[in-house]
Amino acid sequence: MIKDEHEYRVSKSLVEGCDRAIAAVERDEDKKKNKPYIWELHYKGAKAMKKMVLSEVEEYEALIKHDPSQPVALTINEFGALSDLLIKARIGLKISQEELAKLAWLTEEQIKLQRFSN
């Protein structure tokens, strides 16, 4: 999960790197012909990495574009994902960690600890 602008920039760069890796693998006709299993592993690995990171980038972009005057609809599948939910709410509502702490009845330090424990 992307938690801030720095992670967002790094993730966008990683997507671009995956695109370059995919293009390089696609051009490697020698490996595709002589070592098809290795070629397929490299190709599928780069595609899977791109898909995973791109979904996180798209989720973060949706959160930062969210109108904070509107409710943020988020769901979690497990209790351990609660801290991620709080971070997403903070990003979508465009509130500070201090404001989130007050809303969640936590201290700002607890919010910061949750942010870095994931």
Image (cartoon, rainbow, N blue to C red):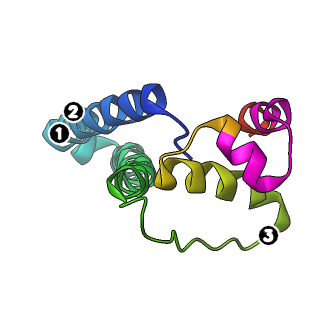
| Left or right side of 26 for 8 | right
Q: Which residue is mark 2?
A: 20
Query: Can you tell which mark lies on residue 46?
Result: none
Callout 2: few (<14), some (14-19), or many (20+) C-alpha neighbours within 10 Å? few
| Amino acid type indicated by mark 2 | Arg
The C terminus: image quadrant: top right
Residue placed most toward the observer, 98 or 78 = 98
Residue placed most toward the observer, 16 or 111 = 111
User: Which stretch is magenta?
Assistant: 99-113
Q: CA distance from mark 3 to mark 1?
A: 37 Å
**Residue shown at the point (38%, 48%) measured from the top left:** 57
| Amino acid type indicated by mark 1 | Ala
**Mark 2: secondary structure:** helix
Residue placed most toward the observer, 116 or 94 = 94
Does 10 appear in magenta? no
**Residue shown at the point (63%, 48%) measured from the top left:** 87
Q: Which residue is mark 1?
A: 23
